[in-house]
Amino acid sequence: MDIKRNCAKAALKYIENGTMIGLGGGSTIAHLIRFIKEEQLDIKVVTPSWETKQKCEEAGLTVIPLSEATEVEVAFDGCDQVDEHLHALKSGGGIHTDEKLVARMAKEYILLVDESKVVKELTYEHPVVLEVIPQALAFVMNQRLDAERGEIRMSSDKDGPVMTDRGNLLLDVYVQGSQDGVRLEERLKGLAGVLDVSLFTSVVTGVVVADESGIREMTKR
Ligand code: 5RP
């Protein structure tokens, strides 16, 4: 049984013909693109992900540049972990600034996950990622980050750091223990020179959770 595939299939019911939808990155979203193609849904897509854009175009879907979008009906995304308050930690892909922009444009922002990603409270076993303008890196690293360490994300394919599409750097912040996610997001995002952070505490409206036994949904209470 392919759990991610089942999860993507369960997302179809949220999509209405004639609308613009947001699609994030990852393997579950890739399944959803295949279903959208199979069902021949008449939708336009906005995406923060280069890979998703390629997959959508291969599937014959119309992709609208993010810079031209103002509102999307529903956006789907993956995450690394989500908790019962619908606080999510994202972005191994380092595209969280644009992912959060799409989330803010969306009337509904729905995460597609398998049960292993759902926890009672975020455990921060994945780092919180900060997109930082290069000029602010030393300043940001010098702040008390509630972290054991902040590590500049280095490229495995070239000498030097990973640069975002805007020429910024990614700082992986390893947060210690349990934290008030809302305050942590506010504080890290509030540092001068930080564009956005990969902690999403106020934008998720729903989660589709799949496991061996089926599908369940979590919504904002
Ligand atoms: C990374 C993400 C991705 O969206 C997520 O990892 C995709 O997961 P999957 O491949 O399981 O759908 O936010 O931080």
Image (spheres, rainbow, N blue to C red):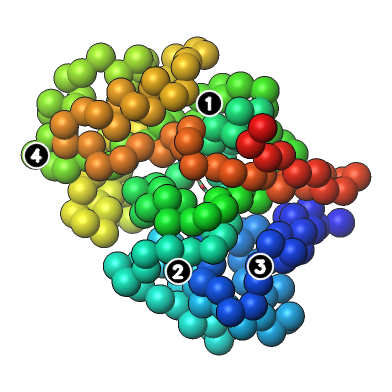
Q: What amino acid is labelled 4 in the image?
A: Gln
Q: Which residue has dot 1 on it? A: 125
SS for callout 1? loop
The residue furthest right is 213
Q: What amino acid is labelled 1 in the image?
A: Glu
Labels 1 and 3: the sequence-earlier one:
3
SS for callout 3? loop
The residue furthest left is 135
Q: Which residue has dot 4 on it? A: 135
SS for callout 2? strand
- Of 180 and 15, which appears nearest the observer? 15
Q: How crowded is mark 4: few (under 14 residues within 10 Å), some or many (20 or more)?
A: few
Labels 2 and 3: the sequence-earlier one:
3
Q: Distance between the residues labelled 4 and 3?
A: 42 Å
Measured as percent of width and height from the top left, residue 61 is found at 54, 82
Residue at horizontal 44%, vertical 34%? 199
